[in-house]
Image (cartoon, rainbow, N blue to C red):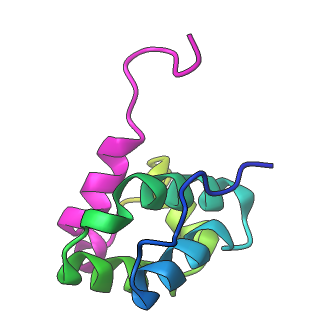
Amino acid sequence: MPETQRSSADLDPRRRRVLFRCWHRGMREVDILMGSFADAHIADLEETELDDLEALMELPDRDIFAWFVGERPVPANLDTALFRKMKIFHTHDRPIHS
């Protein structure tokens, strides 16, 4: 079962909490989508991006997953720069385990 590969020792309390919550969503697919993004970017997110990430974490996993995989369009108020950054992070033009 994937879990964070990043230490939170150097993070402020808010970022530690966000990192933990990204990896402990409930729906494993969303844990991986949000958690791996947080591992890579949590330290350098702007405060407004953290606000957007925390708002996204309040939403149901099923909705988040549907937006990520293109099953449903992302609502305009949630189609933030952060959400687009997360989608780009998970876009691969070749196998990820080659």
Q: Residue at x 42, y 80 (%)?
A: 15
Q: Is residue 77 left or right of residue 40?
A: left
Q: Quadrant of residue 92?
A: top left
> How many numbered marks appear?
0
Q: Residue at x 55, y 62 (%)?
A: 7
Q: Position of residue 97 (x, y in %)?
A: 59, 18
Residue 86 located within the stretch drawn in magenta: yes
Q: Is residue 85 left or right of residue 92?
A: left
> Can residue 57 be seen from the camera position used here?
no
Q: Quadrant of residue 89?
A: top left
Quadrant containing the C terminus is top right
The residue lying furthest to the top in this view is 98
Q: Position of residue 87 (x, y in %)?
A: 35, 49
Q: Position of residue 80 (x, y in %)?
A: 22, 69
Residue 35 located within the stretch drawn in magenta: no
The front one of 41 and 93 is: 41
Q: Residue at x 60, y 75 (%)?
A: 20
Q: Is residue 45 left or right of residue 15?
A: left
Q: Quadrant of residue 75?
A: bottom left
Q: Which residues are magenta?
A: 74-98
Q: Position of residue 19 (x, y in %)?
A: 51, 72
